[in-house]
Amino acid sequence: MKSKKVTRETEEKPYETDEDDFVFGQHAAQEALRKARGNKLFLLKNAGGTKIDELKTLAKEHSVPVKWVPKQKLDQMSAGGVHQGVVLAITPYQYLSLEELMEQTKSQPFFVLLDHIEDPHNFGSILRTADASGVDGVIIPKHRACGITPTVVKTSTGAVEYVPIARVTNLTQAVTKLKEKGFWIFGTDIDGTSYQNWDASGAIGLIIGNEGHGMNTALKKQVDEMLTVPMTGHVQSLNASVASGILMYEAFVKRNE
């Protein structure tokens, strides 16, 4: 795939770009190195400490060259992100197909489907929680949605290297295929069943809607049951990553009782 230079414009509109060739931040770089995705490690000139030593060791283990550069160079490569003195050039992220995802997971998996999530911080946070709560895979659309960007990797603190991610052309068709395989599909809506009464057993898929518009109409028609998180405050909505976090942990608890 052709390389893309990380710019402030790609940071503002991540859903219009493909994979980027850099990750930044100490945790993100460590996990990418452990997964053998590093090409070259850029470290802040004269930086030291335990974390830097660990990165140098990992780079040596995986035959990744190290280059010491000034802060201005790291700022440029990370598009002004909080790089902690570390930027790693990587191979492009390899998404799975839906079929590959289903083949490599257990018999009754728990998948999270993201309906055109556009904010890389939301996406990264969802991946971090998905890893912590035992989600078996995340499914995202190819178009008009955030993919794996440096900000997503940084926000996920490296969880992106451990949560299988499938990218599909059409989410509605993907849900149809899941239902044909016996999946029970859940969505989120203010008028749904309380998440505390959720039967999260078996093969299930949880759809998280877009930050501004929620779930699209076609997907809603395929949902077997809508779930809601009861609220008493004046603002009757939750951030996408917060709502998904509550639901993922509820599923984790119920699936491990």
Image (cartoon, rainbow, N blue to C red):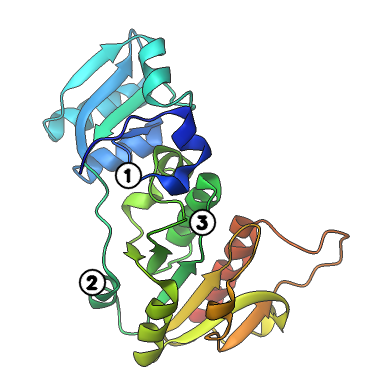
22 or 9: nearer the eye? 9
Tag 3, which secondary structure?
helix
Identity of the amino acid at label 3? Ile
Q: Residue at x 24, y 38 (%)?
A: 33
Residue at which label 3 appears = 126
Compute the Cα span from label 3 to label 1.
18 Å
Q: Earlier in the sequence, mark 2 or mark 3?
A: 2
Relative horizontal placement of residue 241, taking residue 10 as reference (left or right): right
Q: Residue at x 39, y 79 (%)?
A: 173
Nearer the observer, disc 2 or disc 1?
1
Residue at which label 1 appears = 19
Tag 1, which secondary structure?
loop
Q: Are marks 2 and 1 in contact (CB under 8 Å)?
A: no
Q: Residue at x 62, y 57 (%)?
A: 211
- Quadrant that contains the N terminus: top left
Image quarter of residue 249 = bottom right
Residue 256 in view of the camera: no
Image quarter of residue 20 = top left
Tag 2, which secondary structure?
helix
Q: Are marks 2 and 3 in contact (CB under 8 Å)?
A: no
Residue at which label 2 appears = 100
